[in-house]
Image: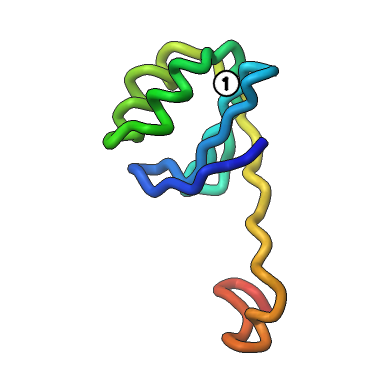
C-alpha cells in the first residue's frame, strides 16, 4: 500500500488499498490503524480534504472499526548519516 505523507492533527500518513477496501492511517505516536470496508469515495474525500484530521475524526474514526498496529519505521535514504550524522535517538 502506498502511503501519502500528511501533517494534519495527529495524522502523519494515510494510505488506501482499493482492492481490499482497507484504509491505513499512521499517527504521530507511531501507531497505525487499519480500517476495513472503507469505500473509495471516503478515501478520496479524506485524501483531498483541507481538514484531514477533522474529516478522519468525524467520518472514519467514529464510523469504521479499526485494527491497531505499529507503523513501519521510515527508512532514511542511504548516505545521509555520512553527511549529517545519526538521527535523533540513533547511535
Q: Is residue 51 left or right of residue 38?
A: left
Write down the quadrant of residue 9 in the picture: top left
Write down the quadrant of residue 45 in the picture: top left
Q: Is residue 9 left or right of residue 14?
A: left
Q: Position of residue 17 (x, y in %)?
A: 64, 26
Residue tagged by mark 1?
35
Q: How is the image coloured?
A: rainbow
Pick the residue in front: 69 or 47: 47
Pick the residue in front: 65 or 48: 48
Q: Position of residue 20 (x, y in %)?
A: 69, 18
Q: Quadrant of the N terminus?
A: top right
- Structural crowding at the residue carrying mark 1, measured as other residues with C-alpha within 10 Å and reported as few (<14), some (14–19) or many (≥20): many
Q: Would you place residue 66 above or below residue 7 in this image?
A: above
Q: Position of residue 69 (x, y in %)?
A: 65, 35
Q: Would you place residue 26 above or below residue 7 in this image?
A: above
Q: Residue at x 65, y 82 (%)?
A: 81
Q: Residue at x 61, y 88 (%)?
A: 83
Q: Quadrant of the C terminus?
A: bottom right
Q: Position of residue 58 (x, y in %)?
A: 33, 20
Q: Residue at x 40, y 28 (%)?
A: 46
Q: Would you place residue 33 above or below residue 75 in this image?
A: above
Q: SS of the residue at dot 1?
A: strand
Q: Residue at x 49, y 42 (%)?
A: 27
Q: Would you place residue 64 above or below residue 29 in this image?
A: above
Amino acid at each position: 500500500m502506498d502511503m501519502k505523507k500528511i501533517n494534519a492533527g495527529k495524522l502523519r500518513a494515510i494510505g488506501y488499498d482499493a482492492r481490499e477496501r482497507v484504509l491505513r492511517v499512521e499517527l504521530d505516536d507511531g501507531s497505525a490503524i487499519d480500517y476495513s470496508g472503507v469505500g473509495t469515495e471516503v478515501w478520496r474525500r479524506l485524501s483531498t480534504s483541507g481538514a484531514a484530521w477533522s474529516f478522519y475524526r468525524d467520518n472514519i474514526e467514529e464510523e469504521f472499526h479499526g485494527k491497531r498496529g505499529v507503523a513501519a519505521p521510515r527508512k532514511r535514504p542511504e548516505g545521509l548519516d555520512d553527511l549529517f550524522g545519526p538521527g535523533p535517538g540513533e547511535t
